[in-house]
Amino acid sequence: MSWNEDQEWEKEWHGNCVNSLNEELKQLVYARKMGLKLSGNGKSSYVFNAEGKNILDIGGGAYSLLLKCDNLGRAMVADPCDYPEWTRLRYQSANISFISCLGEDVLKEDLGIFDEVWIYNVLQHVKDPQRVIKNALASGKIIRIFEWIENGISKGHSHNLTKRELNLWLNGIGKVEYLNETGCVGLSYYGIFVGNR
């Protein structure tokens, strides 16, 4: 499949984005592995305290983890997929900017510097995962990442990521763990890395 065909497959996978529970439950696992801690706010137990940080979510899609944060500073999702208009309105009402942008083009868009850049379950879907990581390192002081590795190539997933590649690109050592919980099944790679800022 071409990258464009992969994007069409991804769009069809998410459909109208109304029933996102399956993906959001998996996101809670990703978040925990990326070092985010639920704090609750009296209204919901599923809230992360962003502590006023400026955060960029590369590839966060229609239901970014940023939607589950309190105390956000500047918050932005950069994602090229064409999601239903109501998802953009939800971001707007949460004071989260959404920019239609490839992760490979984050620096070209001149989005500025962020305290943190988040990447989770996205690098199998991009054109050039190494470039996305390079852009994240240049855009953030801290990079939080969760990715599936050694899954092979399939519809919608044009890269077979490895621990060796990710460690090299991130200039560090991530943790590798086999998961089988809440719909998250497979070999995972995750960690917190220092950006180039």
Image (spheres, rainbow, N blue to C red):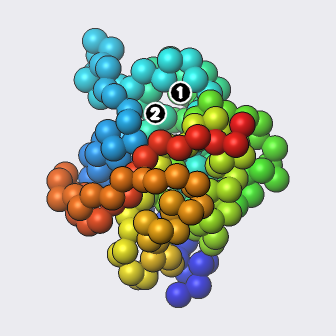
Q: Residue at x 59, y 78 (%)?
A: 3
Q: Is residue 120 left or right of residue 113?
A: left
Q: Which quadrant: the C terminus?
A: top right
Residue type, numbered disc 1: Ala
Q: Can you tell which quarter of the image residue 48 is in?
A: top left
Mark yes or no: residue 123 visible.
no
**Image coordinates for residue 142, horizontal then vertical, percent:** 57, 37
Q: Which residue lies furthest to the bottom in this view?
A: 1
Disc ID at residue 67 = 2
**Image height check: is 114 above or below 165?**
above
Q: Can you tell which quarter of the image residue 69 is in?
A: top left
Task: Kindly state the secondary structure of the residue where label 2 is placed.
Answer: helix
Determine contact: label 2, label 1, CB under 8 Å.
yes
**Image coordinates for residue 98, horizontal then vertical, percent:** 63, 42
**Image coordinates for residue 170, horizontal then vertical, percent:** 57, 55
**Mark toward the viewer: 2 or 1:** 2
Disc ID at residue 94 = 1
Q: Is residue 173 left or right of residue 151?
A: right
